Image (spheres, coloured by chain):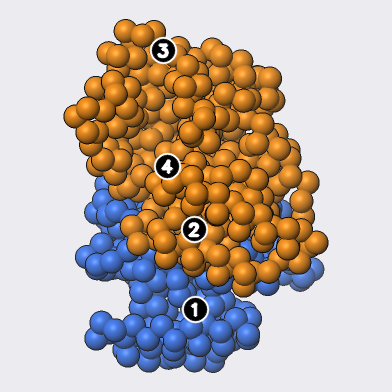
Chain colours: A orange, B blue
């Protein structure tokens, strides 16, 4: 049995290798401000934090913060913040029991105010990439980073509380609040599919993108753009469901997204989680 | 300061990402029986062994064997045996003193018969990919794997002795015997060059290939083919030395090598070592 943290690191690596993943960095595409090898470095840098997420003596929020810190140091940018937020509770569940939806729900329900503080502190490590909050930003705006911790503590908010409050506008928070339904379902699909693991991950990415609007796209470009992207992904996914993959059409879609600066990053985050499920729960090979 | 084992793992990852690397798997090319993501998995799988190479309580040969075992389990093929043989003494030197040629020489000179036994046992983990030895193979044929250990012990051969005996026909053994001159020089070049690290690694690969015939090519295809490959690499390297890189010409060279089944793997192994030097000694970023 491979180590849980190693499976999480490999999930990050295979996620970014999988191509085509329209709008995202993948083996065949860099973005203007994000290069493939920065994701490789980010995955290696996150490893000590992923190890900490395995250790029940470590607060989950601290493990997550450490993973983000190491990622940002190595990648010198924000490559995998969301993917690590997906992975942290999955890794903790796997390392301290089993990787089941019930066990992950227990991990989520067991989070504390200290975990919420770790989540906010994690933003300090990527703050130059996330931007400063406006002066009138709410107390709990994530751009405040650790400056928001007093407000979190005053309101006695756990990490699960924070995720529940963001679930309607953030696909990762939605997974936290709904027992990682989409992540596990995509992991099951990856595990039962055939072919190289990176190809299966790319297929899972397209299926996830076709099923629900990407919330990072919605946040940056509005709900209409996110809906359009979902519909176009769905058309492509339907067209390729018979087994044949129209790689040219997918590549054209990818090029259009990149031209528009549209980056479905949340869907990539869920894909990394799904790969971890496939590796850790089902022991798939690359 | 990043951990030494993490730098070694990242060196393996950036090595395989660097493109174009004519004749080898890289970000833009799989080979028929070797896929890119198998190298990602091999790097992750090698990590516990690389950690062991850092630990002076661990025999270096045992650390190397463990790295190869983990690599083969994860990749399900032989992706980075030679690169790990380059990295093992470099990692040990860095973790127990400093990453200098003098210190690496000390590590090499300090190897024992037990280290030699670990080297042979490592072949057991990749034996299905290396092939069986003919019945009349010499006692020390590496294809014998651990079956050769009694002969190693009877002759009181250290790992340094084995490398010295192979130095004229194996570019990795030559580095062991000559204080890793080419590896350090290439690492220095990578550290002082500009641009993304994976691009610098690909340039270093071409420079190494242009300088000396690749011994894996010589072993598989004969000295004439290895010489031809070196000359063609030298022409390309000269043509691009002015700063402009003729990526089309390099790509055409790569395609010819792949068509002929010519895989300059030893040169890739040295490139991984050079990347480790750049990361560990000079602290370069991706």
- Asked whether disc 2 touches disc 3, contact meaning CB atoms under 8 Å apart, the reply is no
* Label 4 packing within 10 angstroms: few (<14), some (14-19), many (20+): few
Q: Nearer the viewer, mark 2 or mark 1?
A: 2
Q: CA distance from mark 3 to mark 4?
A: 24 Å
Q: In percent of the image, x 62 and y 22: which residue is there? A: A104
State yes or no: discs 3 and 1 in contact (Cβ < 8 Å).
Answer: no
Measure the alpha-carbon separation of dots 4 and 1. Answer: 42 Å
Label 3 sits on residue: A157
Q: CA distance from mark 4 to mark 2?
A: 15 Å
Label 4: state its secondary structure: helix
Residue positioned 55% across, 54% down in the render:
A228
For label 3, count other residues whose C-alpha is less than 10 Å away and answer few (under 14), some (14-19) or many (20+).
some
Instruction: Answer yes or no: are tags 2 and 1 on the same subunit.
Output: no
Q: Residue at x 51, y 21 (%)?
A: A164
Q: On what subunit does the disc labeled 3 rest?
A: A
Marks 3,4: beta carbons within 8 A: no
Question: Dot 1: within a 10 Å radius of its alpha carbon, few (fewer than 14), some, or many (20 or more) residues?
Answer: many
Dot placed on the residue nearer the N-terminal end, 2 or 3: 2
Secondary-structure class at tag 2: loop
Q: Which mark is residue A219?
A: 4
Considering the numbered disc 3 on the image, is that residue within a helix, a strand or a loop? loop
Of badges 4 and 1, nearer the viewer stands 4
Q: Is residue B59 above or below residue B231?
A: above
Left/right placement of residue A57 relative to residue B101 reads right
CA gap between label 3 and label 1 equals: 55 Å
Q: Which residue is mark 2?
A: A23
Q: Which mark is residue B22?
A: 1
């Amino acid at each position: 049995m491979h180590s849980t943290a190693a499976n999480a690191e490999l999930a990050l690596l295979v996620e970014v290798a999988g191509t085509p993943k329209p709008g995202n960095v993948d083996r065949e595409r860099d973005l203007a401000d994000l290069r493939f090898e920065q994701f490789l470095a980010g995955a290696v840098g996150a490893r000590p934090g992923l190890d900490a997420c395995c250790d029940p003596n470590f607060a989950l929020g601290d493990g997550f913060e450490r993973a983000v810190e190491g990622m940002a140091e190595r990648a010198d940018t924000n490559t995998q913040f969301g993917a690590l937020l997906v992975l942290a509770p999955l890794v903790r569940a796997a390392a301290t029991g089993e990787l089941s939806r019930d066990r992950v729900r227990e991990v989520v329900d067991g989070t504390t105010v200290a975990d919420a503080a770790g989540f906010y502190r994690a933003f300090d490590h990527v703050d130059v990439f996330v931007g400063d909050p406006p002066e009138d930003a709410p107390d709990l705006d994530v751009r405040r980073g650790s400056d928001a911790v007093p407000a979190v503590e005053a309101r006695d908010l756990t990490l699960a509380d924070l995720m529940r409050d963001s679930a309607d506008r953030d696909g990762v928070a939605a997974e936290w609040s709904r027992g990682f339904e989409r992540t596990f379902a995509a992991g099951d699909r990856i595990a039962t599919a055939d072919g190289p693991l990176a190809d299966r991950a790319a297929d899972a990415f397209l299926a996830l993108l076709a099923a629900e609007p990407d919330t990072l796209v919605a946040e940056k470009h509005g709900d209409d753009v996110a809906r359009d992207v979902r519909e176009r992904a769905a058309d492509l996914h339907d067209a390729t469901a018979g087994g044949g993959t129209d790689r040219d059409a997918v590549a054209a879609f990818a090029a259009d997204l990149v031209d528009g600066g549209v980056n479905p990053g949340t869907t990539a985050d869920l894909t990394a989680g799904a790969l971890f499920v496939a590796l850790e729960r089902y022991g798939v090979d690359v």
